[in-house]
Amino acid sequence: MIRSAIVAPLLLAALLPAAEPPYRLPPLREIASTQQEWLKLRLERVLPPLMRKHGVAMWLVICREHNEDPVFYSLVPPTTFAARRRTIYIFHDRGAQQGLERLALGGGSQGGLYQVYRDPADPAREIPDDAQWATLRKIIEQRKPASIGINVSHVSAFADGLSASEHERLSDALGPEWMSRVVRAGALPIEYLSVRLPEMDETYRNLMRVAHWLIGRAFSNEVISPGKTTNQDVIWWLRQQAHEHGYGTWFQPSVRVQKAREAANTSPLAEGGPVVIERGDVLHLDFGLSAFGMKTDTQHMGYVLRPGETEPPAGIQAALAQAQRLQDLVIENLRPGRTGNEVLAATLAAMRRADINGTLYSHPIGDHGHGAGPLIGLWDRQEGVPGKGDLSILPQTWFSIELGVRAPIPEWNGRELFVGMEEEAKIDAEGRIRWTLPRQERYHLVK
């Protein structure tokens, strides 16, 4: 039986004209074609200079079906859903003149992007297990790379995709002579995942337009009937709308309801039952879409007007302005060459000088929601993040500028309000940074 709290917003939505999205996803075949072209450009334009930058003459990406390396899905088109039994990708840098050689032991050519090795005894069959390792050794012996990078890392999961058993098999196959040339690929897979193509920009802006459009509808009377609708109703409305428009959601959205009479629980670890949204409540939403192999991540604020109000109380508006000022400070300090921890320290120092009580937990975004690259704080680690926070910021990368402030609200008798905001921004090739879309400047209003 459907609860009346759910029926009310759904009936209201049914009475309204169908909303038209600012962007419609093209057919799957067209999406796949676009992603294939992006993959080709990444392998040709992004990967070779990164291998030379990090001194990796040959890079091995080795994984098996059901245990794929995190970088695997950014090396294959969307028509490849898994590794084939075992897939070994070999990237051999033959120098600037000859370019990068791309070989595959197992799997397919990925639309002609890899030279595939098959069973020499029967080319119609896939290369068998033992022959894969023997062939890998033979390829290495023929090419004699000065260094062989593998994905093993204590710092980042994005650089730690080689399983322990596959490392053992690799060691057995290569023997001491070639294993002496094996090095940890380190930042190579992280930076490959992190760097964005300019060709991706407009598509990503379109995805963000849809995210903002859905949030605006969710925080309106189309969905919310004060006194009836719960935060869980809004969450499931968002998921259903994303699904109906062809998008995935890479995490369960959250809607926090802050009331003047109750202290706000701002921990992302907090769990609780449905909360009825009432007039005078402040709403916080965290929402992310998936499409084209990319992720969005957005946090916006809403306010439910009381009778006679046309805007939130001044204290609530001032809290949003503080969060916007903290966003400005992040943008001022986010520069290529700095580490995430350096940006964090500089921004927090500026924040304290501005008398703002806030926390900063921004992160890269792209192929993954919490993407590869330097972390700029964690919500519960404002002293810096060892390892992940020590990575350097690169040009041509995208960041989710994610943060929160706490401010006493005079209209709430000094009770604190939490304002959480998150907007995507891009650092271009020249190191300039700009918002993907205009950021939230005022509360979404529910009348």
Image (cartoon, grey):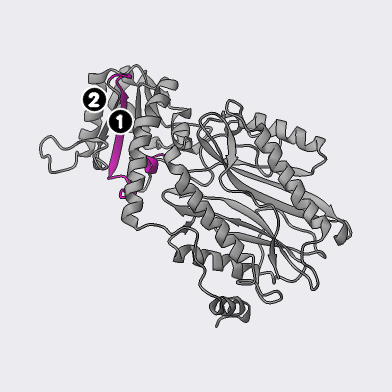
Residue 416: percent from left, percent from top: 81, 55
How far across and how far down the image is residue 441, in percent?
69, 52
Q: Is residue 80 magenta?
A: yes
Determine whether 310 is above or below 43 in the image: below
Are there few (<14), some (14-19), or many (20+) residues within 10 Å of tag 1?
Answer: many
| Residue 171 as seen in the image, left or right of residue 14 | left
Disc 2 element: helix
Say which quadrant the N terminus sits in.
bottom right
Question: Where does label 1 land, which residue?
Answer: 90
**Residue range corresponding to the magenta coloring:** 71-97
**What amino acid is labelled 2 in the image?**
Ile
- Would you say residue 76 is visible in this rendering? no
24 to the left or right of 145: right
- Distance between the Cα atoms at labels 2 and 1? 9 Å
How packed is label 2: few (under 14 Cα within 10 Å), some, or many (20 or more)? some
Q: Amino acid at mark 1?
A: Ile
In this rendered view, identify the residue nearer to me: 110 or 219. 219
The percent coordinates of residue 66 (x first, y second) are 36, 48
Kindly check if marks 2 and 1 are in contact, taking CB atoms under 8 A apart as contact. yes
**Nearer the observer, 432 or 46:** 432
**In which quadrant of the rendered image does the C terminus lie?**
bottom right
Residue 212 higher or lower than 294, as above or below: below
The residue lying at 83 percent from left, 40 percent from top is 355
Q: Is residue 407 magenta?
A: no
User: Where does the image place residue 381, in percent across and percent down from the top left?
Assistant: 68, 39
Q: What is the residue that sits farthest to the left in this orientation?
A: 121
Count how many numbered circles sit on residues in the image: 2
Q: Which mark is residue 139?
A: 2
